[in-house]
Amino acid sequence: MWLAQRVQRVRPSGVRKIFDLARKAKDPVNMSLGEPDFDVPVPIKEEAVEWTRKGFNKYPPSGGIPELREKLSAYLKARDIFCEDVVITPGVTGGILLALMVTLDPGDEVLIPDPSFVMYEYQTSLLGGTPVFFDTYPDFTLREELLRRAITKKTKIIIINSPNNPTGAVCSRRSWRWLHGSRGKRISSSFRTIFTSVSFMKGKARHPVSASCVRTSSPSEGSRRPGA
Ligand SMILES: Cc1ncc(COP(=O)(O)O)c(C=O)c1O
């Protein structure tokens, strides 16, 4: 087998099985991928064409166009979200992968809410980390007690997706405070990084961001630009 061992460890996603089943269904309603039922707004298309005409087609610096990084930083600051740095990636998928690559060592555990977006488990496994799920059933809220029990000496990262995909559950202020306040206490050495992925909130998400937090955000589905 010429495929790398880390790829062979990955089990097929249940989502893909559903896609296969749906393909056989007669006239199914597609609620799978987060694609809105409207086209990319014309001003956005025109803006993209305009910049292409202006010759804005070269490789940008690796971290993204400096003016864009500055603008995003100011945008987040105006919403009480303070970041040490802002990096532009082609989508949240690439952003989280990069963040995991620079933080995970083999065997490190990544705490992931169950249920949650499918990619966290796969990215973790591909990088040699161990995905550990913590239960959020039946109301999909984060319960400190369960999370506390899931934390071990190997826990490196907690992934919080708020609002969560697929449940839509939002992490409460109390939970955010607990997550951030726990640093420096008994479990502090256990986790160092919290990924938050907030995709659809417009200025409503007031999430404290600390030095140990990587926050990823994507305009993709909200403005009908998947992967943007
Ligand atoms: C929670 C979550 N993370 C990441 C993604 C992928 O985002 P992007 O298209 O920016 O890579 C999605 C898309 O549905 C998502 O729901």
Image (tube, helix red, strand yellow):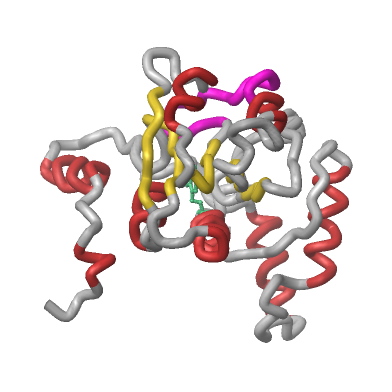
Q: Which corner quadrant holds the C terminus?
A: bottom right
Towards the viewer: 107 or 118: 107
Q: Which corner quadrant holds the N terminus?
A: bottom left
In-image side of 16 versus 208 (left or right) = left
Extent of the magenta region:
163-175
- Residue 201 is at least partly visible in this image: yes
In-image side of 4 versus 104 (left or right) = left
Towards the viewer: 195 or 36: 195
Residue 81 drawn above or below residue 143: below
Location of residue 92 (image quadrant): bottom right
Query: At x 71% / y 29%, what residue is drawn?
Result: 181
Query: At x 43% / y 31%, what residue is drawn?
Result: 150
Query: At x 44% / y 38%, what residue is drawn?
Result: 112
Q: Residue furthest top?
A: 138
Residue 106 x/y as whole percent: 40, 61
Confirm whether the magenta stretch covers residue 138: no
